[in-house]
Image: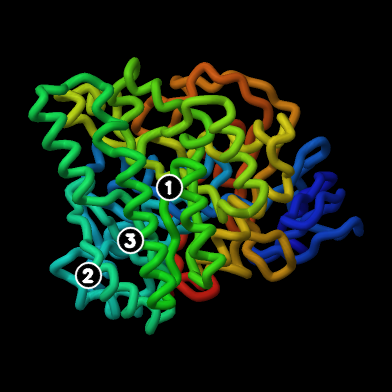
């Protein structure tokens, strides 16, 4: 007898939408079809869509590190509520740079996660020789910065070239934060020299030119070395065009983007300051700018959507002036909802949504076919979605330690009603319903958990 039956829902894959029951046994999908099979537990999914759980490939849960901002317990609970069943995490305040640090972090996390998780490693200028060891220890990607951010020093082009050559030889994948150090440093010097402390410094300091220069360099070096590279949190259509150009020339380079670049406007920072301080900043100035991002997402020029969940509480955001305020936004529990609303508004089809939040990130980072799909043999990671649910996003509903969302006050259609990780319900109706520790650490390569 099977363990669990999800009955009467509408299954969504990257290729199709169709009515089917989903059956689970030993934590994996056992069958998908219209035949009724005996099971110990049944869940009525009538009127709901059944999607693969979101694979969020870019989160910061600050654990260990600045856990007053977030930890794995609260971060993974927020993820589960948001329909995320797998995360790939890295922490700036306590970066993993070598195999020993990875083992220590895995031991620390122990039974602290509600969802399955992989880990990424930072590459630092004085630790380039550690790349091979940390990759072979099982991280899912190497995170690189091209400018100093969050206390992590940037890599100059010569260092990038060296790392990319090593990554190509290892068939490793690099996720790169692209802002040019020489431009951000010069902009900061000029703004501080002028005595600027107003909120408007953010888009001038972390400028379009800084992003474009770094993206062009990173994409070119990816092509020259054959390295597999993802441009992190691409903020605007011109950035994406630069990547597409190098892809057409043979580069193995992809684009990650985030909801803030589809929904938030550049001028909001002048009113909201630290609550719109993230890097790169929001770039959209017009409705046309936003629409072009949706066009590029539909066309496949944006490979996948992640959250770049980097929370800070209101008090932390407001401490000090705009130069000192924390970068980052919370997002792990609102991203899928915002994309469901986009599907409601016909900006995105549900199959394309599944592709960009589940299957493509799972494929890129070595989690597929165990994660990112609803087919026999895959982990039973799924989210039941109520597309008829209409609500207004509120700070009061946020599970993350941040306690606020930049999307508060938005009316949205579509909600993750229940989330299952390996067949176990971990969230329901906006609240976590399982204990930390159900989530497993995943090694790179098919998503097999560490033993």
Q: From mark 3 to mark 2, how far is it between C-alphas? A: 16 Å
How many numbered discs? 3
Image quadrant where one finds the C terminus = bottom left
Which residue corresponds to mark 1? 233
Which residue corresponds to mark 3? 143
Residue 252 visible within the image: yes
> At 19% across and 37% down in the image, what residue appears?
187
> At 59% across and 60% down in the image, what residue appears?
360
Q: Dot 1: within a 10 Å radius of its alpha carbon, few (fewer than 14), some, or many (20 or more) residues?
A: many
> At 54% across and 54% down in the image, what residue appears?
55
> Looking at this view, is 432 or 204 the one in front?
204
Q: From mark 1 to mark 3, how far is it between C-alphas? A: 12 Å
Is residue 337 rendered to the left or right of residue 131?
Answer: right
Residue 292 location, x and y as percent? 59, 38
Number of the front mark, 1 or 2: 2
159 lies above or below 344: below
């Amino acid at each position: 007898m099977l363990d669990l039956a999800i009955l009467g829902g509408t299954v969504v894959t990257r290729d199709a939408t169709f009515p089917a029951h989903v059956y689970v046994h030993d934590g994996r999908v056992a069958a998908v079809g219209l035949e009724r099979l005996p099971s110990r537990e049944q869940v009525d999914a009538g009127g709901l869509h059944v999607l693969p759980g979101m694979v969020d490939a870019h989160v910061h849960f600050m654990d260990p590190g600045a856990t007053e901002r977030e930890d794995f317990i609260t971060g993974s609970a927020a993820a589960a509520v948001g329909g995320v069943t797998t995360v790939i995490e890295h922490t700036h305040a306590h970066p993993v740079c070598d195999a020993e640090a990875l083992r220590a972090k895995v031991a620390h996390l122990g039974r602290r996660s509600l969802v399955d998780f992989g880990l990424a490693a930072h590459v630092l200028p004085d630790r380039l020789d550690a790349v091979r060891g940390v990759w072979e220890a099982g991280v899912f990607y190497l995170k690189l910065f091209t400018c100093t951010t969050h206390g992590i020093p940037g890599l100059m082009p010569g260092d990038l070239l060296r790392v990319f050559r090593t990554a190509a030889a290892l068939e490793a994948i690099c996720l790169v934060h692209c802002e040019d150090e020489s431009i951000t440093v010069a902009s900061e010097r000029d703004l501080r020299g002028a005595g600027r402390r107003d909120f408007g410094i953010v888009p001038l300091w972390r400028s379009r030119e800084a992003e474009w220069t770094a993206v062009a360099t990173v994409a070119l070096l990816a092509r020259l070395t054959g390295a597999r590279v993802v441009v992190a949190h691409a903020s605007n259509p011109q950035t994406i065009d630069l990547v597409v150009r190098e892809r057409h020339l043979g580069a193995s380079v992809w684009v990650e983007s985030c909801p803030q670049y589809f929904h938030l406007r550049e001028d909001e920072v002048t009113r909201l300051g630290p609550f719109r301080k993230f890097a790169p900043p929001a770039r959209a100035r017009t409705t046309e700018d936003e629409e072009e991002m949706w066009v590029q997402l539909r066309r496949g020029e944006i490979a996948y959507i992640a959250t770049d969940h980097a929370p800070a509480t209101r008090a932390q955001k407001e401490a000090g002036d705009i130069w000192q305020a924390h970068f980052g936004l919370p997002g792990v529990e609102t991203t899928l909802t915002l994309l469901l609303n986009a599907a409601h508004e016909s900006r995105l089809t549900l199959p394309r949504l599944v592709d960009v939040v589940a299957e493509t990130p799972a494929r890129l980072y070595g989690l597929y076919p165990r994660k990112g799909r609803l087919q026999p043999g895959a982990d039973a990671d799924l989210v039941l979605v109520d597309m008829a649910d209409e609500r207004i996003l509120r700070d009061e509903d946020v599970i993350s330690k941040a306690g606020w969302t930049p999307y508060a006050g938005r009316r949205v259609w579509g909600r993750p009603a229940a989330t299952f990780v390996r067949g176990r319900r971990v969230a329901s109706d906006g609240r976590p319903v399982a204990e930390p520790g159900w989530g497993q650490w995943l090694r790179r390569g098919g998503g097999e958990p560490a033993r």
